[in-house]
Amino acid sequence: MDIRLLEIKEKVKSHERLDRADGLYLYESHDLLAIGEMARDKKLEMSGRNVFFNVNRHINLTNICVSRCKFCAFGVDENGEGGPYLMTADEAFEFGAAAVDHGITEFHIVSAMHPNLGLDYYAEVVRKLNQGFPDIHIQAFTAVEIFHMHRISGRTIREVLQVLKDAGMGSMPGGGAEIFNDEIRRKLCPNKAMSDEWLDVHRIAHQMDIKTNCTMLYGHIESKEDRIEHMIRLRELQDEMPGFQSFIPLPFLPENTSMEHIKRTSAVDDLKTIAISRLMLDNIPHVKAFWIMLGLPIAQIALDFGADDIDGTVVEERIMHAAGAGTAKGISKEDLVNLIKDSGYIPTERDTLYNIIKEF
Ligand code: V47
């Protein structure tokens, strides 16, 4: 380990915060195992030997989207190609209901920016699921969807969140954050919430006692500086108004997108990004290795690089699979448990809010 890495290690050990230069140095270093070890120690300190997963069902209500982000293979025009679809509230209910017998504890609802669906529709979906299955937590709508509902309805962000909360929304997923560099956002996704707007939605959600997750889309046209800046913006918001539960780095999957020429991130980059985020985000309790995107082998190794969560059994995910995720659309609980056990950690089924349901 070189002197600079030793310095960083000392800082981590003595709970001194890593700064931009530290984060960048970690990205530039080729000592992957040293970085992984630091992150693993940090993970052990923060959440012990538990590795969390949950049993959920993803519901993607529609793929009709006005945003058309360059990195996305899921969104389509209302009357265009690519199989536009929209579930009615009843269909969404049936879709969710079909998974209830599989022991799910969460509905995970992420969709698109539909041109003319009103706030009433989203509230109705949430209300129906909540009334039908009051014990199943509803984690719904990314900040960009909430921001879109605010624009379309003319209601304030707080009012939109209140309507959804009253209908039964329990928490929010972390998507739509992409990368907090507005120059890049204007190139990749000009029609949706910019960085400050995304952060505002989460700030207000946290003020309203709605827990949220956060993500970072990496491996497209951003720089390492952008990634570190992104993490620091999240860390600052968490200091100011805590409420993030988990950080999920999302490697860009290029297939079927308009940036197909970009190569998929390497295993080294994925593992470094997990580790560096664990080290930089000292105030966000969990780092999730989303196996759907990383693939099961890298997700399993990520558990030794600072990740303490491997997401869920995820029945029928569509957004990542549209972009060429080669992983299965779901995994059984038994397989997930074995995969975690194999790495020496305690497989721990959690609910959405990280209450422990069962250790295996
Ligand atoms: O916002 C879209 C990303 C996100 C691609 O909170 C892509 O627990 C890579 O929010 N390659 C949606 N990424 C997914 C999401 C999510 C997923 C899992 C867990 C949680 C959580 C949240 O997916 C989008 C965007 O950042 N995305 N297209 C692509 N081609």
Image: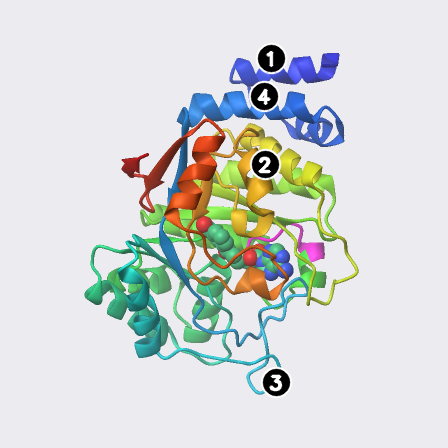
Q: Which residues are magenta?
A: 176-184
**First of labels 3, 2 by sequence position:** 3
Secondary structure predominantly adopted by residues drawn in magenta = loop
Q: CA distance from mark 3 to mark 1?
A: 56 Å
Q: Inspect this view and state whether residue 18 appears.
A: no
* Separation (CA) of disc 3 from disc 2: 37 Å
| Residue matched to label 4 | 38
Question: Residue 111 got which mark?
Answer: none
Residue 183 is left or right of residue 142, and the answer is right
Pointer 3 and pointer 2: residues touching (CB < 8 Å)? no
Residue type, numbered disc 4: Met
CB of mark 4 near ligand 1 (< 8 Å):
no
Q: Amino acid at mark 1?
A: Glu
In which quadrant will I find the C terminus? top left
Q: Which mark is residue 80?
A: 3
Q: CA distance from mark 3 to mark 4?
A: 49 Å
